[in-house]
Each structure stands twice: as C-alpha cells, then as structure tokens.
Amino acid sequence: MGKCCRTTLSSGSNFIRFFVSCMLVVEKGTKKKEGSAPSLQSGVYVFPNGDRYEGDFIVTEGRIERSGTGTEHFVDGLVYTGQWKNDKMNGKGEVKYTTKATYVGDFVDNECHGMGIYTWPDGSKYTGPFVHNKLLGAGEFTDTSNRVWCGLFTGKVADGLRLKIS
C-alpha cells in the first residue's frame, strides 16, 4: 500500500479536506498542455459537512469537481453510486435511502429524471419515467404480491391502473 497523502485545497472561502491514497491517484491521458482540459483523477475526499466522496474528479482552478463515476456517502445516511458531471449526479446511478428504499435509473442535475425504478422498503416498486423527482407518465407498479399494475402516473396519483395479464 502507498502512503496516505493529505492536502488541503482552497475552494473559494471553503476548505475541503482532501485525502488521497497515493496508489489510487490516477491521471488518465497524456501530460497536460497549456489550455487543455483538466485530467481525470481518482481519490477520496470529505466535505466540511462530513459527506464523503470516493471516485473520479477533476481539479480546475484549485477546485475539485466530481466527474466520471463515484460514490458519495451523505451524513444523513443516503448513498449515491453512479455517474457525475459538472459536480452533480448526472447519468446512470443508484440511490440507497435511509428508509431502505432505492432508486436505480437516470439522473439530471441531482434529480431522478428519465427512466428509473423506485423500490419501497416492502419490495413494491414503480418502473417508468421520472420528471424532476416525480413519477410522471406511463409506468408500472409491482405490488408486494408481484402483481403488475399499468397506467399513467402523475406524482403520487395513478388513476385507472389496470392489472397486467402475463
């Protein structure tokens, strides 16, 4: 194992404690040329509020930006694993909530947005489109008896669901 390096980077007026295992830091690509895009690196850092991120990032103007794939453990117990872009959850990912519910699917700017599957702690689930964290559109609800109900969902309401016959 490599030594553990500890560096403090300035991010505006905030300071981020940055812990990087020297064995984990990976620069992908060739040497950085003047004016070229920042290189992708991997490591672990802890935000001032205690959230912990492990994964890919870029450093631009002395600021760390989550980019690529990684896992963030939030202090409230929520865990996100997936793709990051522009320092936000963007792309495919999974959230594990403290309630034992999960969401697997598309994210846009930190929101469930696109196709996804939300599973409640009792095992029932919704499969279909999400728009700004809301169920919206033609989807399926699978109940705890494994019966599948189809219909149009608008937020928490799904009037006129029909049982899907296999």
Image (cartoon, grey):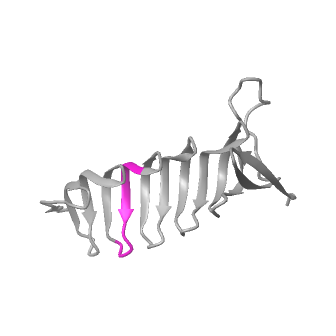
Rendered view: 84 above or below 29 = below
Q: Can you tell which quarter of the image residue 163 is in? A: bottom left
Q: Is residue 3 left or right of residue 155?
A: right
Task: Please check the rendered image and state whether residue 116 is part of the magenta-colored stretch, yes or no.
Answer: yes
Q: Position of residue 61 (x, y in %)?
A: 71, 36
Q: Position of residue 52 (x, y in %)?
A: 65, 61
Pick whichever, 81 or 111, lies toward us.
111
Rendered view: 1 above or below 100 = above
Which residues fall within the magenta stretch?
112-123
Q: Position of residue 48 (x, y in %)?
A: 67, 59
Look at the image and tell me whether residue 118 can be seen: yes
Secondary structure of the magenta portion, mostly? strand
Residue at 32% in and 54% down: 134
Q: Quadrant of the N terminus?
A: bottom right
Rendered view: 165 above or below 143 = above
Q: Position of residue 45 (x, y in %)?
A: 70, 56
Q: Is residue 84 left or right of residue 47?
A: left
Outermost residue toward the right in this view: 3
Task: Please check the rendered image and state whether residue 16 is part of the magenta-colored stretch, yes or no.
Answer: no
Q: Quadrant of the C terminus?
A: bottom left
Residue at 68% in and 41% down: 58
Q: Is residue 143 left or right of residue 119?
A: left
